[in-house]
Image: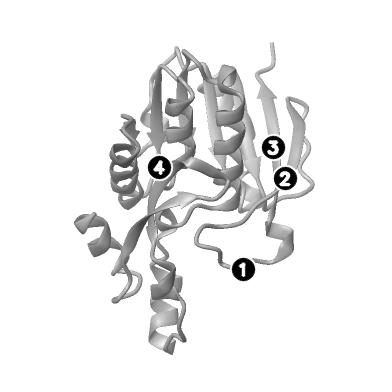
Amino acid sequence: MTQLNSLIQTMLSDASVTPQALPQCPEIQLYLVDPISMARPFSLDEIRSIWEHTAYWAFCWASGQILARHILANPDLVKGKKILDFGTGSGVVAIAAMKAGARCVIACDIDKDALISCEENARLNNVELILSDDLFAIDDNDIDLLIAADVLYDRANLSFLDTFFDYAPKVLLADSRIKDFSHPHYEFIDRQESFTVPDLDELDEFRFVNLYSGQAPE
């Protein structure tokens, strides 16, 4: 946790992380930014630092919490399977998959700080993850399922919907940012309300998470 405190202070000098249970997934704890350190007025320089050095791994975003809960509630989705978690962030969904009985999980994120967070969070939850910082370097033809939460924050990222099938025949996706995407190989599953932990009091439109299931074309 000492290393994570050093990393979070790149964003805000007096910030720290604490282990926090997730309200919608109480089986999982994560090292997340202490909400007390965020509950004060910030100077202009601090706002600039937060904006430029946002520690995305230090928050559990709504889509991650919902996808983790969906997997824990439906363990057959991952049980005994090899999973690739793309854009893993804090590792919440990867950890949920391991707790639900996955054979192994590759947690992939280009943010090296996020991978340090994943490793610490996996240890906190008594599971092990395989870490990767480059999706395109993963050369593995026996991945059963790719999981991803909150990776469509930019419409340019919609191209990933096809790329995912290069790595796995099935995809499980959660997103709260793009409301109107349609794709012939993805099926809408459900829509659920959630929130970021710690709660950032985001706009209501970002508090509703859509779940999709993808099947590779034959």
At mark 2, the secondary structure is: strand
Q: Quadrant of the N terminus?
A: bottom left
3 or 1: mark nearer the eye: 1
Q: Which residue is mark 1?
A: 201
Q: Quadrant of the C terminus?
A: top right
Q: Earlier in the sequence, mark 3 or mark 1?
A: 1
Q: Which residue is mark 2?
A: 192
Q: Earlier in the sequence, mark 2 or mark 4?
A: 4
Q: CA distance from mark 4 to mark 1?
A: 26 Å
- The image position of residue 78, as x and y in percent, is 53, 20
Residue 119 left/right relative to 210 = left
- The image position of residue 33, as x and y in percent, is 39, 63
Q: Which residue is mark 3?
A: 211
Determine the image quadrant of residue 75: top right
Q: CA distance from mark 2 to mark 3?
A: 8 Å
The crowding category of the residue bearing disc 1, from other C-alpha atoms within 10 Å (few below 14, some 14 to 19, many at least 20), is: few
